[in-house]
Image: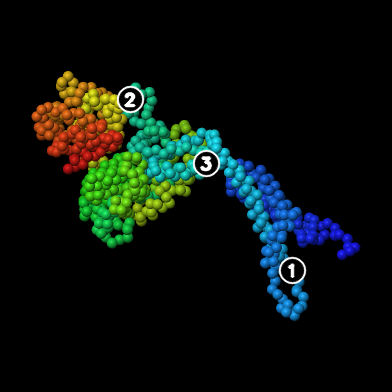
Amino acid sequence: MAGSSPSPPGDGSRGPDGDPSGLTPAKLREVAVTALIGGGVTALFTVLVEGVRALGTGLTLLTSAVVGLAVAVLLTLGHFSRFLRRLLEPVKRIVTRRRAPAAAGTGGPDRPPSRRRQRLERAGLKLSAGYVGVLFGAAVVMVPWGAVQGGVWLSHRIRPPDCERPLELRVVTAPENVLALRESIALFIRSRLVDGCAPYAISVGVAPSIGELAYALGDNWYRDDVRQEGGEPFRRLYGPRADAWIATSTGEAGLVSDEMKAGGATLRIGPTVASDRLVIGMISGRAEDIRERLPLERPGSHSLRDLWTAIRSDSGMSVSYPQPELSTAGLAAVSDLLLLDDAADDTADDVVDREQRGIVAESVSSLLCQFKTVTQGAGGENLARSLAVVVPFHSLTDYNNGRFNDPRCPEGASSGRNKLREFSSPGLSRLDYPFVTIDWPNERSEERAAGLGLLRGWLTAHPLFGDGAAGKPETGAAVRGLKDLRDAQSEFFDLLPRVDAEIALDVSGSMAAPPRSLLVRLREAFPDVKPVITPRDDLTLSSFSRIGGKTRVRELQPSVSREEFDELTKSVIGATGRGSDAPVSDMIMNLNGRAGSPGRALVVMTDGGVFDNERRGESIGRTLARAPHVTDLYVLALGDNGCDRSPPRRGKYRACVETGPDMQQALRHLISSMRGKARR
């Protein structure tokens, strides 16, 4: 209107777009609210992306306040504010829409909006503006952050950063757990990357057997001194020294700790990082037959006695488990079977030991590897129908998926009738896999302790074998404790048939020929036989070769048992190759003619050349028939020739065992084969 004077600033008058002119109290409140929203969103995203760790708390709050104020000014003042209000006009119309008054049909004037609707209008606009403010605040933070992260990613691809040397840690566990542990640790390291750099380098190794592990932990991770070569300037270790150990069970950890000598490492048994149970596995076709023989009960609830009767007595199957002297899973299986014997009238011999003659293996992994090799050989399916194995459930699953921790095992997943099916029972052990921290004397490190603590927490939160991958343990399934395993160890050794044998070592020149002397390989492998020797065994050692046209047989070590086995090992280490191949018949008659020699088995360790040097008209079979003091003959064939040169096995000639690349396992297999024959 002409003559009217302009309203003073701040009086609440509105401009052409309806926006109050000036910084009114309402406008200041709107600025403050929007600043709080923008600053809060900034702080929230900074925390979520862990930017607070890089910026620090004070700088993070300052940055959030500045960004929040900038967002508030942009949203509430100036042209963008007016544009935003026009953009929200449809929202305003929806919020403030009124029902037509009853008097609208009479042409009367509309009622003025009520105070309640005015408040609703203002609240709707503020909520809409606040929502847009949150989105805009997030964009203000995320766009620069995304640009920075993208730049860092691109720069790392173009030129990887120079990472600091990571903290090296070593974790050991049983062979059957290695694959799962490596995969879980890889995820842990990936979760801890900082700018593409890993703060930890964690390797996974195979833990020695219970006895060897107790020795190593009690002696600074050194091997038994008997392995030392005379000229070696250093003591041998069991590989890189371990910082932690994933034991198969709490009982195993207690047993190792109890057997360690004073002054060694300290074991701290922590939380469990997995849960599993022992099961009896067999190929699918055979499992169907066994199920028909079992009582009608819920799967997994059958007693171990019912399972054993259906598998052994009714079906005549051979049941194998890892050697209890070397594998805790095998020892737990023996503990279960011994309890089964205690509850029955038959003797323990009917359950324990004979069943593992089907496949002799030092670990769960080796057992399943041999099982698969057997099934893929000639007549494999028929042979597999006669075999069952006692293993942890996750190992059976790995077998079916073709996951082996040994490159020598046949590749590929099992399918159809060759898949292994499990039978579980409350009478079979549960395995709890505790995380055991190894503290070495005078080597306390806070950085190492922190790293192991983080790894322990990760494995506890992300259990091995998957969360519940092994299924819920059956009702009544127990973890075998220290006393259970110790009793099983002692009773099992008492049940094993005694081995009484003369070992005849071929020391001809071919045994020491380069590039890899078979005698040297035998020296390296021989100490690994000790865990399968019992206190009741009796072994002697002689060497033989042909020197100056005559067969020379020399006694290297008189009678030894488990306690003196190191002395026999030292005699093997001291043997040197000389002369040529001597006829086996001459050596047999020489040993048979020793005064007072009792009737005992003879073990010949040779590269096979001795089989080609028999005198005309002589043979090993005829010689054995004339040697009453030699009850059985076993041959351990070293090198590439294997048993090809060996004559047919008949009469007293019981077996020829080829060493292949794994001489330790071949030696153990030979001892187990002798025990099987001794029982008969």
Nearer the N terminus, badge 1 or badge 3?
1
Q: Secondary structure at mark 1?
A: helix
Disc 2 marks a residue whose amino acid type is Glu
**Can you identify the residue that label 1 sits on?**
115
Disc 3 marks a residue whose amino acid type is Leu
Which mark, residue 229? Answer: 2
What is the CA distance from the residue labelled 1 to the residue labelled 2?
Answer: 100 Å
Furthest residue to the right?
Answer: 3
Disc 1 marks a residue whose amino acid type is Arg
Between disc 3 and disc 2, the foreground one is 3
Q: Position of residue 507 (x, y in %)?
A: 23, 25
Q: Secondary structure at mark 3?
A: loop
In the displayed structure image, the side of residue 414 where residue 137 appears, left or right? right
- Residue plotted at (60% across, 46% down): 146
Nearer the N terminus, badge 1 or badge 2?
1
Which mark, residue 193? Answer: 3
> How many numbered tags mark residues here?
3
Residue 306 vertical position relative to residue 580 in the rendered view, above or below: below
Q: Is residue 499 visible?
A: no
Q: Position of residue 87 (x, y in %)?
A: 69, 60
Neighbor class of circle 1 (other Cα within 10 Å; few <14, some 14-19, many 20+) is few
| Residue 84 quadrant | bottom right
| Residue 674 quadrant | top left
What is the CA distance from the residue labelled 1 to the residue labelled 3?
Answer: 58 Å
Q: Position of residue 15 (x, y in %)?
A: 79, 60
- Residue plotted at (23% across, 30% down): 607
What is the CA distance from the residue labelled 3 to the residue labelled 2?
Answer: 44 Å
